[in-house]
Image (cartoon, rainbow, N blue to C red):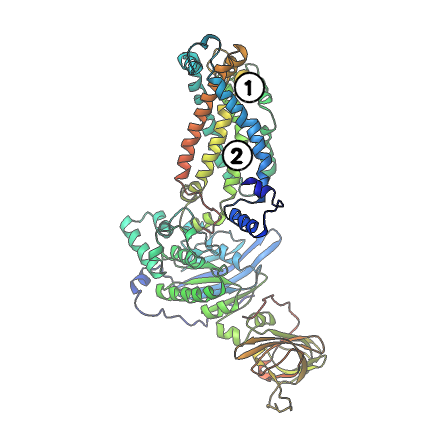
């Protein structure tokens, strides 16, 4: 099928070729499909192949699990209370972080719809964290929120507390880092979804007697919600795979022992690749589950044009 | 600067069928706009506008794009704050209220229907905001949907409707609240020509049946003339003229208004002689006798604009037979474009001086034919000075 479209110059007899090409075109098969090629190659080489390789590796237990059967790597993970607990730890970080990111993105992008002095500057400040890697963010958090960082120095200078607040090397440090690195994405996405909603819809609602809250509640929010669910999924995935910041600003005692750290330790510290892969597969399944729930919710909402013309 | 013309024909809503609805509708006796204006920085989009709208009137704001008519409408709706002036509804000042508390209905150019709500929910939106009882909302929505003939589409989403249907939903949504004033912002401009004619009649019917007061913004003079009880012509933020369709059509106050009212031929001439009720002016082979516009004084030697409707330009018979008394003067032109319009031909002709003259005739004319043209003197309006003209495009 694809050879026909990729090489239309190879000529079968004239009448059949035309007919076939037309029939193909009607099913959406034509030469523009070639544009997909680089993307497909990249996806196969960089995602599908490693994924399938990891998947089959996860069913070949090694080390202590070597004789436990095909699912030994998985059962080892689920039977270890500390390892298993990393799932809860990760959700406990990723869900609040994503909700906070999306939650803050809405009012800020709502305000950023109209023009005001300093809008560009504010936009830059909000988006700059994207350019900082997670490592740099984590470093900054250690410096800023650390026991002798600016934050605690200020608190003590103001006599708000007589001992430094512990905001690094624990849950809060990781959460801050997830918000700092995840918020710009959430904001940019929400901002573009929101600008896709025609301003005349809110004006119409206003002339129909709706106050600002009612306008948001009954018009803007329902139209924005599908976009917010997509945004939630993206920030959730970013947060769920948190690794460097959990290592750097996390709790060394294991309270921020997230699932990616567990996988890393199995694979690269205990050299149990099979169990490392098994954990990665569990991680993937969990992310798919959350995204699946979000997308199922989304499919129940209105997701058509929001251009004001209806 | 602008005058309030109170020579209104009070429109009589037709029939008693909707008497109950009319009684419910938020009637008022007058809405007074006093010197309302709007500036964006140094740019004044709307110069002080004075207008008194009576309950039940249909007012059209007419002007080309960028003349300030939409600004005026948005200011009245409360979507734009006024720079100066006040709006009073029966003596109660309302220009400081936010749009949601003014209670004016508005029909947007792009309809602005809520795409995630059904037709019924769109129409019910305003009543829901007022927290009316469910049964009342249901009844009133059904009533108004019947009025705009959309009952069988009530369950659909706006995206499933045609342009004309969406437009009627927008009207229904605005009038279900029985607002004292309905503001319409070029509601027909997104529709095709045939549908526009139907919807025009529909809007007038709804206006009458519901006993509405309507302020209608348009750039289409035919729409304005056919719908409105009174017209306000705007020229770059200034009021050019306020009056009934007949007043504007018969005696436009300026060449600008004339151009809007179908005087497609506006010739720049120099005054030769002035008598009590006639002016003779000429340029480049055209010499016309015309009637000075009401209240205008022209001096000999000054430049004037002479406005003539295409249907008032006549072809003088080949033998020079047209010797109608009182004709304005004869001039020559060459037919350039001839359009067939059934009973008449629409002709674009070019004079020797390069002026383009539009005329209508039932004679068969071919492009390139030489024509002798004339017009009755009382059909030639002479305006002093040279004013910039609106770009109205075709007169259809």
What residue did someone put label 1 on?
A244
**Label 2 secondary element:** helix
Residue A77 position (above or below residue A133): above
Q: Residue B172's image quarter?
A: bottom left
Within-10-Å neighbours for mark 1: few <14, some 14–19, many 20+: some
| Residue in the picture at 57% in, 54% down | B39
Q: Quadrant of the N terminus of chain B?
A: bottom right
**Label 1 secondary element:** helix
Within-10-Å neighbours for mark 2: few <14, some 14–19, many 20+: many
What residue did someone put label 2 on?
A187
- 1 vs 2, front mark: 1
Marked residue chain, label 2: A
Going from the N terminus, do you reach mark 1 or mark 2 first? 2
Across and down, in percent, residue A145 comes to 54, 19
Q: Quadrant of the C terminus of chain B?
A: bottom right
Decide which of A6, B123 is in the foreground and name it: A6
| Mark 1 to mark 2 CA distance (whole Å) | 22 Å
Q: Residue B241's image quarter?
A: bottom right
């Amino acid at each position: 099928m694809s050879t026909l479209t990729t090489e239309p110059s190879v000529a079968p007899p004239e009448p059949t070729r035309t007919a076939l090409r037309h029939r193909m075109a009607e099913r959406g098969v034509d030469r523009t499909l070639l544009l997909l090629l680089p993307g497909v190659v990249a996806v196969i080489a960089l995602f599908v192949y490693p994924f399938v390789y990891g998947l089959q590796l996860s069913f070949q237990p090694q080390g202590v699990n070597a004789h436990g059967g095909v699912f030994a790597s998985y059962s080892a993970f689920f039977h270890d209370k500390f390892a298993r607990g990393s799932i809860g730890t990760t959700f406990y970080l990723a869900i609040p972080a994503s909700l906070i990111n999306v939650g803050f993105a809405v009012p800020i992008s709502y305000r950023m719809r109209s023009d005001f002095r300093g809008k560009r500057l504010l936009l830059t400040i909000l988006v700059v964290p994207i350019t900082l890697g997670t490592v740099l963010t984590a470093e900054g958090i250690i410096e800023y929120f650390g026991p002798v960082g600016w934050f605690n120095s200020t608190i003590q200078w103001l006599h708000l507390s007589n001992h430094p607040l512990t905001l690094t090397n624990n849950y809060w440090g990781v959460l801050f880092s997830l918000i700092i690195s995840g918020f710009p994405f959430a904001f940019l996405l929400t901002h573009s979804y929101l600008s896709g909603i025609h301003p005349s819809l809110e004006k119409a609602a206003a002339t129909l007697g709706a106050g600002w809250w009612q306008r948001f509640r009954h018009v803007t929010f329902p139209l924005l919600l599908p976009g917010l669910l997509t945004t939630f999924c993206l920030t959730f995935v970013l947060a769920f795979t948190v690794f460097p910041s959990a290592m750097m600003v996390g709790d060394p005692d294991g309270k921020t022992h997230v699932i990616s750290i567990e996988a890393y330790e199995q694979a690269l510290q205990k050299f149990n690749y099979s169990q490392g892969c098994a954990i990665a597969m569990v991680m993937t399944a969990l992310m798919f589950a959350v995204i699946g729930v979000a997308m199922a919710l989304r499919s129940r909402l209105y997701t058509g044009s929001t251009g004001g013309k209806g | 600067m602008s005058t309030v013309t109170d020579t209104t024909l009070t429109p009589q809503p037709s029939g008693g069928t909707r008497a109950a609805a009319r009684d419910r509708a938020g009637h008022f006796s007058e809405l007074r706009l006093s010197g309302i204006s709007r500036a964006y920085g140094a740019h004044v989009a709307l110069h002080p506008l004075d207008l008194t709208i009576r309950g039940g009137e249909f007012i059209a704001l007419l002007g080309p794009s960028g003349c300030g008519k939409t600004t005026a409408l948005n200011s009245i709706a409360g979507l734009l704050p006024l720079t100066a002036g006040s709006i009073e509804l029966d003596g109660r000042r309302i220009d400081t209220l936010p749009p949601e508390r003014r209670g004016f209905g508005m029909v947007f150019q792009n309809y602005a229907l809520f795409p995630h709500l059904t037709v019924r929910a769109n129409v019910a939106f305003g009543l829901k905001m007022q927290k009316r009882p469910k049964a009342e909302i249901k009844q009133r929505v059904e009533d108004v949907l019947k009025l705009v003939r959309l009952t069988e589409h009530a369950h659909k989403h706006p995206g499933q409707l045609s342009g004309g249907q969406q437009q009627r939903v927008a009207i229904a949504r605005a009038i279900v609240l029985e607002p004292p004033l309905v503001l319409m912002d070029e509601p027909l401009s997104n529709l095709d020509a045939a549908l526009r004619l139907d919807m025009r009649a529909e809007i007038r019917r709804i206006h009458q049946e519901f006993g509405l007061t309507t302020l209608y913004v348009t750039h289409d003079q035919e729409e304005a003339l056919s719908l409105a009880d009174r017209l306000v012509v705007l020229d770059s933020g200034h009021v050019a003229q306020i009056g009934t369709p007949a007043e504007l059509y018969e005696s436009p106050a300026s060449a600008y208004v004339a151009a809007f009212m179908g005087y497609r031929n506006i010739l720049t001439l120099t005054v030769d002689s002035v008598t009590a009720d006639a002016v003779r002016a000429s340029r480049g082979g055209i010499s016309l006798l015309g009637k000075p516009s009401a209240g205008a004084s022209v001096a000999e030697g000054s430049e004037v604009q002479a406005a003539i409707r295409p249907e008032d330009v006549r072809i003088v018979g080949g033998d020079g037979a047209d010797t109608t008394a009182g004709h304005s003067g004869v001039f020559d032109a060459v037919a350039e474009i001839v359009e067939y319009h059934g009973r008449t031909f629409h002709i674009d002709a070019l004079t020797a001086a390069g002026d383009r003259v539009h005329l209508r005739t039932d004679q068969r004319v071919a492009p390139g034919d030489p024509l002798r043209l004339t017009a009755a003197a009382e059909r030639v309006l002479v305006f002093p000075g040279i004013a910039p003209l609106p770009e109205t495009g075709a007169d259809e």
